[in-house]
Image (spheres, rainbow, N blue to C red):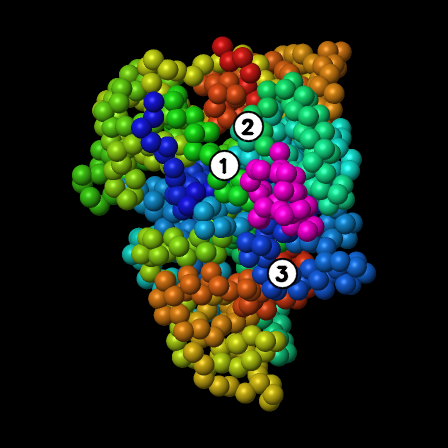
Amino acid sequence: MDILRFATAGSVDDGKSTLIGRLLFDSKAIFEDQLEAVERTSRDRGTEYTDLSLLTDGLRAEREQGITIDVAYRYFATPRRKFIIADTPGHIQYTRNMVTGASTADLAIILIDARKGVLEQSRRHAFLTTLLRVPHLVLAVNKMDLVDYSEERFEEIREEFTSFASKLNAPDLTFIPISALHGDNVVSRSENMPWYNGSSLLHHLENVHIASDRNLVDVRFPVQYVIRPQRATDPALHDYRGYAGQVAGGVLKPGDEVMHLPSGLTTRIASIDTYDGPVEEAFPPMSVTLRLEDDIDISRGDMICRPNNQPHAAQELEAMVCWMTDASKLGPRTKLTIKHTTRTARALVRDLHYRLDVNTLHRDESAQALGLNEIGRVSLRVTQPLFVDDYARNRLTGGFILVDEATNNTVGAGMVVEAR
Amino acid sequence: MLQRDYTTSQLDVLEAEAIHIMREVAAEFERPCLLFSGGKDSIVMLRIAEKAFWPAPIPFPLMHVDTGHNFPEVIEFRDRRAEELGARLIVASVQESIDAGRVVEETGRRASRNRLQTTTLLDAIEDNEFDAVFGGARRDEEKARAKERVFSFRDDFGQWDPKNQRPELWNLYNAKIRKGEHIRVFPLSNWTELDIWDYIRREGIEIPSIYYAHTRKVFERDGMLLADNPWITRGDDEPVFEAVVRYRTVGDATCTGAVQSNAATVEEIIEEIAATRITERGATRADDRASEAAMEDRKREGYF
C-alpha cells in the first residue's frame, strides 16, 4: 500500500465538503462519535441537513463564522492506498492556502458546478495547480443530477476547460462527471450516466500511477545532518562519519561515483546506512545516511550529486514567488531569509519583472510590489550559492521559502525557473 | 530505462518524513527535547528518533509531564525505556507545581490534573530553556489538530494562535524563533491510529501491558470505563466491577477510559481498530468531552 496526497479545490457551493464527507464516510474514515458531534452541532445551529463541512472546520472561529480558515488535513484508506487530503478553503487567503496544499500533492481535484460551468475561480484553481506542478489533475464536474445527467453539458465543460488548460502546460488531466450528494461516480460507477465510460473518482484515486512522478534520474542528496557518534561506547564507531538526509532525486547505490558541492570534489559512496542495516539503493523519499570513501569536509546545506549531472550553483535566481503576508510587500530591495533544501541564506530582491493576474494570466509589468496572495516573477540575489534545479524538473530542489527577518514569519514561496 | 517502479509503502514514507523532521530539529535548534509519556505515539516517536541519529545516541533529552496520577505499568515502562537508551529523562511534576503554588488542585468528583499539566509543561520548557519540543500528536486525532502545522510556533507565553500559523510548504520547515519562544514539533502529524499500530507490529516494538486485554476493577462514568484508583472520587451510583479491558490511549488515570476488549496481541488490536466505529479520543478521553472546542482551547493555552 502506498500513499496518495491530494488537494481539493473549490468552495462549499461546489459541493466540496459533501464530496470529501462522502469519500470519508464511504471508506469508513468518519466515526460515529464524529458524526454525532456534527449532527448535534448542525441541529444546534438550525441547519436542516448534516453539515459535513463541520468535520473539517475544526477551529472555534471557523464554526462561529461558518468559514474555513486554513488547510485541513484528513486521512482515509482503502485496501489499495492510504490517502492524505489537503482540504483548502475556497475564499479567504485562498491562494496562500492552495499553494501550501498543492506543494506536496500528487493530485488535485478541482470541483466545477455542472450548472455554472468553468468559472473564473476554476481557472484560478487550475492555474495554481499547474504552477505548483501537481502531476495529476481531476476535473470533477459535480451536481450532474441538477443537469439531468446530461452528457452534452459534461462535454461542453470538458471542451471549455481543455482549451483553457492547453495554455497552462497542464499535466495529466481527467474529467469525471459526479454527483457528490447522491454518490454518482464517486465510489462506484453511476447507472444514471451510462454514456460515461471512465472510472469512478475513487477508482481513479486508487489507481492513478504516481511512482514515476518523482525524479528518479537526477541524483540529489541535500546534506541535512552530520552523524558522528564520537562518544559511543563501541570503539568501532569512533571514526564513523555519516551524512544524513532525505533523497531529493535519483537513485544512489554503494560504489557510485558522487560529487560534493560546493567543493566539486568527487568520491564514491562507501555505504548507505540505516538503523535497520545497510541498503543497496536509496531513492526519494527515503531518509538515509551516506558514508563516503574519502574524507571530505562536508556540512549541512551541502549537496551530493553525480559528477556528470549537477544542479546549478546559483547566487542569482529567477523564480515565481507567491507572497503570503499582508504585513509587508515584496518589491525591489526587499531583504529576506531564504530556505532551500537544507541550506539557509539571505536573499535580496533585485527586480520584480511582472505580477501575474491568476484569473486572466495577464502579466502586469508595471507592478511595483507583490501583496498578499499575489504571484510574480522575481530576480533574487543570494549571499551564498544554492544548488537548484528548475522547479518543473524537481519540486524539492526547485522550491524555496522566504522568511521575514524581522517577524520570522514565512512570507513567501518560490519556484525556480530558468536555473542557470 | 528504470528496472522497477520504486514503490514505497505507506509506513516507509511516513517513517522517512518523520526522520527528516527530527533531523531538521536537531540541526536547527539549540535545545530540543522529546515528550515521552510511555504512550504508544511517543513510543513510536522515540523509535523514529533512534533511527534518525543511529549509530549516534539520540541528541536530546526526554521529558515527561507527570500528573502523579499515571498508571504504574506505564511509569515503569517509561523509566526502563529511557534507561535502555541511556537517555536523560526529565520528569516535570504536576504535584510540585501544586506544592509550589503555581496551580491549584481541582476539587470535586470530576477533579482532574489534566488541565494543570499545561502550567507544569510550560514552566519546564522555560526552566530548561527548550526551544523545540517534540510531541506525538497526530492530525487524525482531533479536528483542531487537523489544522496544526508540523512546526507549530508558540509565543513567549507558550500560546498557539491557530489563525496566525506559518505556511508550511514542501518539506521545508521554518525554525526561526526569538528567545523565549519555542516550536512544538509533530513528526507523526500524518500518521493515523492504524498506522501507529501497523508500525508497532512491523517493528516489533514493546508497549506497556495496559494496551493489551487484562482484568481490571473499573466503574462506569459518562459511558466510559474508568479504573478504580486512589485519585478519583466515586459516587454511590458508580459501583466497581471487574471487566476484561484494554486502553486505546494512555493518559492520566482520572480521565482516561478503558474499552472492553479481548485483544491480547498487536494483531488482535489491529483487527479491533480496523473494525471500530468510534475514534480513540471519543472512546476514551473525558478531557476532550468538555466542549466542542475543548482541545483547541487547551492547545491555545499551551497544552500538548
Q: Is residue B292 visible?
A: no
Rendering coords of residue A6 (x, y %): 56, 39
* Label 2 sits on residue: A172
Q: What residue lies at 51% left-to-right and 65% top-to-bottom?
A: B276
The disc at residue A208 is 1
Q: Is disc 2 placed on a helix, strand or loop?
A: strand
**Residue drawn where x is 47% and y is 65% of the image:** B248
Q: Chain of mark 1?
A: A
Q: Amino acid at mark 3?
A: Gln
* Nearer to the camera, B253 or B225: B225
Image quadrant in which the N terminus of chain A is located:
top left
Q: Residues within 10 Å of mark 3 (few under 14, many from 20)?
A: some
Q: Residue furthest right?
A: A46
Residue toward you, A391 or A182: A182
* Magenta span: A175-201
Residues at badges 1 and 2 in contact (C-beta under 8 Å)? yes
Is A346 on the left or on the right of A1, as rendered? Answer: right
Residue that label 3 marks: A34
> Is residue B216 visible from the viewing direction of this image?
yes
Residue A291 vertical position relative to residue A393 in the rendered view, above or below: below
The reply to the same-chain question for discs 3 and 1 is: yes
Which residue is depicted at the point 58% across and 54% down?
Answer: A26
Q: Amino acid at mark 1?
A: Val
Chain ID, mark 3: A
What secondary structure is marked by label 3? helix
Quick check: is A226 in the magenta stretch? no
As measured in the structure, the alpha-carbon distance from the residue carrying label 3 to the one carrying label 1 is 30 Å
